[in-house]
Image (cartoon, rainbow, N blue to C red):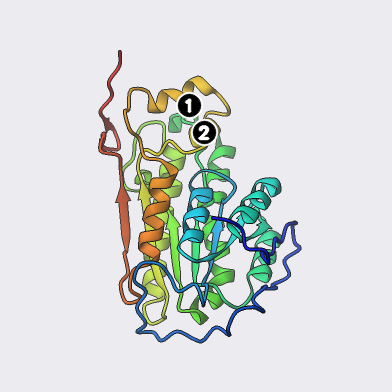
Amino acid sequence: MRARPDAEVVVGRGEGTGRHTEEDQPPVEPRSPWSVNNGRVNEIKRPLAVVTGASGGIGAATARRLATEGFEVVCAARRADRIAALAVEIGGRAVVCDVTSADDVVSLAAAVGSRCDLLVNNAGGAYGADPVSAADLDQWRTMYEVNVIGVVAVTKVLLPALVASQGQIVVMGSTAGQVAYEGGGGYVAAKSAVRSVVDTLRLELWDQPVRVCEIAPGMVASEGFALTRFDGDRAKADAVYAGVAQPLTSEDIADCVAWVATRPSHVNIDRMIVRPRAQAAQHKVHRVFG
């Protein structure tokens, strides 16, 4: 999708302005709680989406897909150069944000302003694959901070804007949050906590016009996920997908986000578990070698 000429890019830690370049568009009228959003969103209103972890992989793919659905996308991530380029590409805005930084999260909220139709809490990651007996506690703390505390922090500051817009929260979980597996203790614990946060939030917002969904992908050959987990060891990262004909792609998950985000406003998808056909369960994957 070509960038709009008037697209605004906000780049810089703690430099959110909260400005919108919508002078050429009609005023946004409040949506009825019974309004129906089928398929492509109304581009005259151009709803606002925030995607964390948008600098690559599932986050970048989701930002691109939401832009094609008519959203103005705020691309939030730590890598300024990547999100700046992405924002120009899709006609969105870039805000440098480390979800584990309280100052960055506050700056993100300031840049977003009083309206947010969709929050995609995608920032996260796995680090290491040691057994619990040999756990690197720093890695465990990092996983909890990024995957859990980061989700809560961003959701907390943007919730008033989401309520005002009768919006939706989509949290990127994992099948690791459904079933444990050897070597995944820290990541399993973090994503299990994510699942609990989502379920609790849905209960607490039961009387508010905000939908809450978790998308829990299985094996996704996304940019950098396994490479980050194994500290840049390409051989170990490649072994995760060895022999699997068609693991999921980042675009597959972005398609799921777009589908969930464009359901009628009275429809809530509580949880979507998505696996490649080759993965019957967390531990049971069809591989063909030779």
In what element is the residue under mark 2?
helix
Where does the image place residue 195, in percent across and percent down from the top left? 38, 56
Answer few, some or many: residues within 10 Å of disc 2's Cα (few below 14, many 20 plus, some between 14 and 19). some
Mark 1 crowdedness (10 Å alpha carbons): few <14, some 14-19, many ≥20: some
Q: Nearer the viewer, mark 2 or mark 1?
A: 1
Q: Earlier in the sequence, mark 2 or mark 1?
A: 2
Q: Amino acid at mark 1?
A: Ala
Residue 173 appears in the picture as rendered: no
Classify mark 1: helix, strand or loop. helix
Task: List the single residue furthest toward the left.
Answer: 280
Residue labelled with disc 2: 229
> Residue 211: horizontal and vertical position, in percent?
39, 71
Q: Which mark is residue 237?
A: 1
Image: 241 above or below 65: above
Q: Is residue 173 left or right of residue 12?
A: left
In the image, residue 82 above or below residue 44: above
Viewer-side residue, 237 vs 8 = 8
Q: Quadrant of the C terminus?
A: top left
